[in-house]
């Protein structure tokens, strides 16, 4: 490997032997399933594939060109540091500020609830009016009057959220106090940022950091029911020897199927493995030439530098459908665990 990578960078063939894993509580073992290490495939969860789109890349590229040429002024919100990084060296996650998140939820939640109500509420009106004794039209108007708020309120939330987010973007979109976690491909380390830090953050603003090798973490799928009793799955990365965990929902959200989480675990391992090129998704395309392993791979295979950026919308939609079908059928439950060679597990 080149000098670009640290000696601690992750490669499956260089995983060292480690102490026995800490035994987890019975409650943890009851609700969580540990996923196997290694033997990954080139697969990406749909959530990461479509985090950036070809059209979005072209729009952003044009925006940057216009700003550089003085044809437009860079927006204030675009000049702020959001502590969020996705490139050839790091995946660092930082949420937006709480106020920004509120407005986004108001917009998205209002829109979602409105359309749900708009689809199902008319049917209940028609059925309800027919079940009453009075004249049908009178009953229908009375029911609509009584229940109209159930879709007018989310419509108002959608409208207000959309107005604020789109017209007052510079005021609304603001960063949080800092990142939550980071995967560093170049060093092979994982960092969890601590905003308690024994009270030091409140006193001086110093953010604590827990940094450990990637191979000291294990991926777990946790499961739990929602209010309707449906089982949902969520992916976490848990440190083997300390009470530290990373919620990987920014990479793969909760899902009623395990398959997207299987794909996400392979995606994370492939990103960290310096023996493999970066996962080939639009998000990383402009960074591929900066990663030695990826650049060498692209030269060897003849991959076009603008593969995603020059992709038309029809081809992109076909890619999404193909990816979704593959992810939905993906299963790693029978895979041998590479880490069993180096760690003795207690669970």
Image: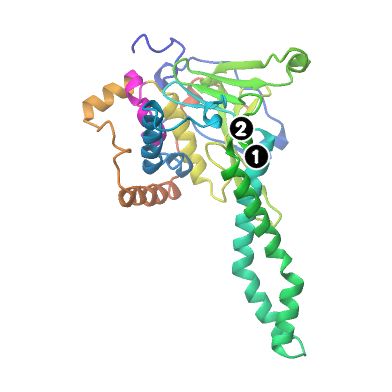
Q: Nearer the viewer, residue 216 or 144?
A: 144
Residue 201 point in image, percent of width and height: 73, 17
Residue 294, quarter of the rendered image: top left
* Quadrant for the C terminus in the image: top right
Q: Which of marks 2 and 1 is nearer the N terminus?
A: 2
**Residue depicted at x 75% and y 13%:** 200
Pointer 2 local density, CA inside 10 Å: few below 14, some 14–19, many at least 20 = some
The relative height of residue 151 versus residue 37 in the rendered view (above or below) is below
The span from disc 2 to disc 1 (Cα, nearest Å) is 8 Å
Q: Is residue 279 visible?
A: no
Residue 133 point in image, percent of width and height: 77, 90
Determine the residue located farthest toward the front in the rendered image. 71
- Going by the image, does 138 lie left or right of 12? right
**Residue depicted at x 54% and y 49%:** 257
Q: Are marks 2 and 1 in contact (CB under 8 Å)?
A: yes
Q: Considering the numbered disc 2 on the image, is that residue within a helix, a strand or a loop?
A: loop
Q: Is residue 282 a member of the stretch shown in magenta?
A: yes
Q: Which of 20 and 205 is in front in this view?
A: 205
Chain part drawn in magenta: 275-292
- Going by the image, does 19 lie left or right of 67? right
* Quadrant for the N terminus in the image: top left
- Give the residue number, with chain letter if any, for mark 2: 95
Residue 15 point in image, percent of width and height: 46, 17
Q: Is residue 95 a member of the stretch shown in magenta?
A: no
Q: Considering the numbered disc 1 on the image, is that residue within a helix, a strand or a loop?
A: helix
- Give the residue number, with chain letter if any, for mark 1: 101
Q: Is residue 82 visible?
A: yes
């Amino acid at each position: 490997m080149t000098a670009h990578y640290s000696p601690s960078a992750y490669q499956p063939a260089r995983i060292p032997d480690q102490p026995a894993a800490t035994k987890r509580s019975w409650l943890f073992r009851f609700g969580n399933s540990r996923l196997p290490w290694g033997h990954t495939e080139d697969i990406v969860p749909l959530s990461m594939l479509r985090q950036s789109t070809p059209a979005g890349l072209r729009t952003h590229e044009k925006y940057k060109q216009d700003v550089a040429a003085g044809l437009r002024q860079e927006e204030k919100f675009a000049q702020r540091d959001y502590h969020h990084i996705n490139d050839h060296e790091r995946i660092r996650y930082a949420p937006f500020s709480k106020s920004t998140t509120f407005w986004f939820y108001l917009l998205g939640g209002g829109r979602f609830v409105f359309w749900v109500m708009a689809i199902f509420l008319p049917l209940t009106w028609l059925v309800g009016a027919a079940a009453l004794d009075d004249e049908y039209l009178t009953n229908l108007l009375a029911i609509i009057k009584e229940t109209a708020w159930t879709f007018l309120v989310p419509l108002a939330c959608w409208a207000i959220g959309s107005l604020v987010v789109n017209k007052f973007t510079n005021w609304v979109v603001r960063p949080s106090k800092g990142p939550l976690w980071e995967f560093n491909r170049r060093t092979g380390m994982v960092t969890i940022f601590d905003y308690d830090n024994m009270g030091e953050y409140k006193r001086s603003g110093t953010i604590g950091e827990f940094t450990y090798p990637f191979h000291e973490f294990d991926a777990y799928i946790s499961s739990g029911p929602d209010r309707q009793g449906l089982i949902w799955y969520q992916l976490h990365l848990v440190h083997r020897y300390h009470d530290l965990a990373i919620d990987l929902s920014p990479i793969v959200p909760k899902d009623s199927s395990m398959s997207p989480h299987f794909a996400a675990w392979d995606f994370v391992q492939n990103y960290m493995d310096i023996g493999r090129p970066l996962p080939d998704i639009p998000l990383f395309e402009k960074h591929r030439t900066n990663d030695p392993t990826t650049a060498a791979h692209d030269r060897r295979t003849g991959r076009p530098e603008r593969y995603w950026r020059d992709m038309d919308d029809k081809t992109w939609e076909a890619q999404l459908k193909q990816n979704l079908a593959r992810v939905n059928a993906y299963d790693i439950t029978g895979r041998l665990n590479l880490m069993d060679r180096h760690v003795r597990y207690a669970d």
